[in-house]
Amino acid sequence: MRPQCEEIIALDLYVLRWWSGVYNKIFDALGRDINVQSIIDDFGELIYREIDYVAEAANAQRFNELYAGMATDVFVPKVYSELTTSKVLTMEWVDGFRLTDSENLAAFELDPKFLVNTLTQCSLRQILENGFFHADPHAGNLLACRDGRLCYLDFGMMSYADRAQRNGFLLLTVHIVNRDWESLTALFQKLGFIPEGTDLKPIAVALEDALPDVLNSQVSEVNFSKVVSKLGDIMYTYPFSLPPFYIAIIRCLGVLEGLAIQVDPQARIVSEAYPYVASRVLTDSQTDLQEALKRLALDPNDGSIRWDRLEGLLDEAQDSKGYDVTAAVDLLSDYLLSSSDLLPQLTTQIVAAADSLGTESLEYIVKAARAIASQDEEGAFSALQSIIGQLDDEDTNIEDDVVAKLEEVLPDPSPSMKRMGRILQLLFSSTTNGGSSTEELMRWVPIFRKLANSPQIQQMSSEILAQLGERALSRTLRAAFGLPPTPLPYSEQSTVTEDTTAPLK
């Protein structure tokens, strides 16, 4: 520690705290509940913890146990406790380069995008999963090791988020990405940002008016700093009181995105965070997160499933490390079985979709047969020969190449068929631990057994088969007498429409 460091910090904090008291009185006179002095107090606490090297050594060891121990891409220097005091910190020497040192990164063939992704994913898990996080991830506190690992330095400024705070920030991300302004304002009030009794409607309108300017794009393009800037304008206009803890998180994520953009101009913290957020919403049984899933996947008006949003969540979640699709399906099935209102609606949706899908599939098969039959013999033989050649080539991605060859000949499937195929692909093609196909299938056995033994599902299956049988018989009789098919009721047609109000991609 530098000489007289504590004395200099004490004087600076005294001055800052005195002026913050003046500003508190000004804000009180303006009718604003903003406590600047509490922010300075929290900042002072962080600063004094940062110059306590025994505490920093303990932080480094705890950080190593939580993150470097479970992530092979993260490295924490060893602390020599026997040589450490409150004024001297002794750690392992590390050779490495700053993430912004593009010349040396290129010389040692280190991938900047991989390092940024490691940094972002580790930071998100610190804040949203374990709660113990590095509060100052700027370029000087991070090194790229020659073996490709990301090295964290300086563990003096750490912070902790409890479960309610972690879930709150996670839900903020969900509501902002999905443009759910009423839920966002209600969450602000629940977290203590807005005083009880405040009229939330004007704030929801202000959010709706301000944020689309920065959110009118794909998730991959949303800039965290711009979102925070717009939120800041609203918080200044309305009676917001931002707890100091959230200021620490916002600062941490702002610094993180700033560094990430320096290394990779296309990096966006919201884009990197959303796969993890989606996986937590789909697999975490906590009440708050399940309420978020309900708001995302079910229509608030009639409770029908919004398949496009569910597909979007499943699609985003598969990009998150450690995502377990069987855990997501298990949780979804539990929610399905516990809801007395959802099963009848789901039955109606499945019957409508299956009936429509069955008709479309039959028409598709006929069209496909005609398409193949219409090809000249030479063309058909050439296509078949190409497909057989792809099957014999061990170095080729068989599935993609065969599909590409078939797509040249076959007609386009209907939107319903595409969606059903996509959801099934997301559910059954995801693996979690690189195990064999047999091991992966065995993970589904308990879920299938639970559903098969459920009286609700058995009754639902009987109703679906009965209704589909009635429709098939009706269609056959109407066709026999030359009558047009019966159109689907409007309520059933609405179950397969696209929801474009809140894009997830």
Image: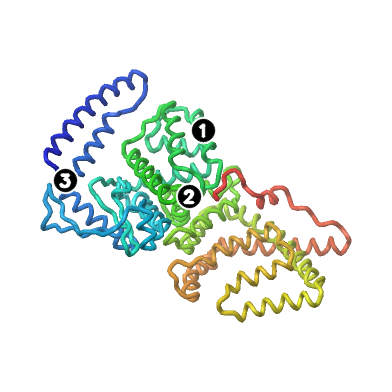
| Quadrant that contains the N terminus | top left
Q: Amino acid at mark 3?
A: Asp
Q: Nearer the viewer, residue 456 or 289?
A: 289
In the image, 448: left or right of 91?
right
Marked residue nearer the N-terminal end (1 or 3): 3
- Residue receiving disc 1: 210
Disc number placed over residue 136 in the picture, else none? none
Marked residue nearer the N-terminal end (2 or 3): 3
Give the Cα distance between marks 2 and 3.
38 Å
Tally the numbered discs. Answer: 3
Q: Give the vertical position of 131 relative to 27 (above or below).
A: below
Q: Secondary structure at mark 2?
A: loop
Please report contact status of discs 2 and 3: CB closer than 8 Å, yes or no. no
Residue occupying image coordinates x 50% and y 69% = 444
Q: Give the vertical position of 493 relative to 356 (above or below).
A: above
Q: Nearer the viewer, residue 504 or 331?
A: 504
Residue occupying image coordinates x 33% and y 27% = 34
Q: Secondary structure at mark 3?
A: loop
In the image, 286: left or right of 36?
right
Q: Amino acid at mark 2?
A: Gln
Q: Amino acid at mark 1?
A: Ala
Q: Crowding near pointer 3: few (<14 within 10 Å), some, many (20+)?
A: some
Marked residue nearer the N-terminal end (1 or 2): 1
Of labels 2 and 3, the one closer to you: 2
- Residue receiving disc 3: 52
Q: Image quarter for residue 74?
A: bottom left
Q: Nearer the viewer, residue 100 or 71?
A: 100
Residue occupying image coordinates x 58% and y 60% = 423
Q: Position of residue 371 (x, y in %)?
A: 79, 68
